[in-house]
Each structure stands twice: as structure tokens, then as C-alpha cells.
Image: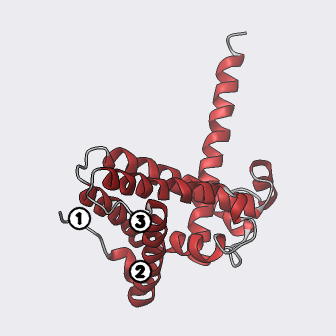
Amino acid sequence: MSTATPQISSRSQRVADRRLAILDAAREVFASKGYEAASMAEIAARVGIVEGALYKYFASKRELLFEATRHFYEPLIERTRQQLAAVRGTRNRLRFVIGRQLESFVEHPGLCRLIIHEIRPHGDYAQSVVRDLNRESTSLLLQILEEGRQEGVLRADLSPAANAESIQRKRSLLADKLGAVIGPEISNYRITEVRA
């Protein structure tokens, strides 16, 4: 009886490791080629499995796209949330969150382009985990804006939701311009400081 537990545990670990390897490979392929040009065969080849084996883990290419995006996005939001706890002052907190978001565009331009241009415009975005994560990211801004309004740092007559939406739109436009101006070399750029 005791020998079955290590085998099950070992098998479960192999399955979990394989799933992570697939997510990493998918993220790389989707980021470099875009959703339409990416192939399940290439993702499988990068992991060292046959294409059909991918479907044991993910029902479709679209499901794999969403899961690979979540695998990237969730830790990013969580790190931002944890680091934000140490930042004081509404302006500093806004700079920090916006800076982190822009930094992610700089460090992961292919994935960010994928989210903005290939996931968000698609019909299934509204029910996707990516939308939920975008809302969670936006909620960080909403919280800061509401705190600033309550503390009197920001005007009381301005809507935190409208301001957060405006910031997110401008951030996306800036990211597009950064990508268009800098191109593939954008990954060599680093935001090193958020000034007070």
C-alpha cells in the first residue's frame, strides 16, 4: 500500500511538470507568432511530445491560449499587488502600478500585443479568464484612485472607474506606440525607476 503513494505522487508530478512545459512553450510560440500563425504541432515539438498529446491537457488551441496567458498574467498581478503594499502615497502608488504595467509591455511585448490585438477583440474575450485578469489589474488602479479621492488627494467629483479606464486606454496606446517605434528591440529596454 505504501508503494502506491510514491508512484501516484511521482506520476502527478510528471503530469504537472508536462503541463507547465506546455504552457511555457505555448506562451513563447503565441508571443512570437501570434495566435493565428501559431500551431499546436510547433508547441508540441518544443515540449517533445506529439500534437495529439496536447489535447490530453487542453481541449483546444484557444483554451491553451487562455491558460498560457493566465500562467503569465496571474503571477504578474500578484507580484504587483505584493510590492504595492510597501508603496505609500496616492501619486507614488499610481506611478508604481502604471510603471509595472508599462514594464510588462517592455519585457513581454509579444504577449502584451497578443492580449491587446488578438485576445481582447475576439468574441470569447468577455467570458475569458484574460478578461477577469484584466479586471483584476484594473481594480488595483481603481482602489488607488478611490483612496486618493477619499483622502482628498484627487478631486471628489471625478469617477475612479472613468479615470482607471482612461489610464488603461492610454497605457495600451502608449504600449502600441512603444512597440511601433522601438519594434523587436523593445525587449532590451528596462524601466529602472519610478520617480516620486
Q: Earlier in the sequence, mark 1 or mark 2?
A: 2
Cα–Cα gap, marks 1 and 3: 14 Å
Q: Residue at x 23, y 66 (%)?
A: 192
Q: Residue at x 19, y 66 (%)?
A: 195
Question: Disc number at residue 194?
Answer: 1
Q: For mark 3, what is the residue?
A: 104
Residue 101 left/right relative to 45:
left
Residue 148 on image: x %, y % = 31, 55
Residue 25 on image: x %, y % = 60, 61
Closer to the camera in the image, 167 or 59: 167
Label 2: few (<14), some or many (≥20) within 10 Å? some
Question: Disc number at residue 174?
Answer: 2
Q: Tell me the kind of residue under disc 3.
A: Ser
Q: Tell me the kind of residue under disc 2.
A: Leu
Q: Residue at x 65, y 54 (%)?
A: 129
Front label number (1 vs 3): 1
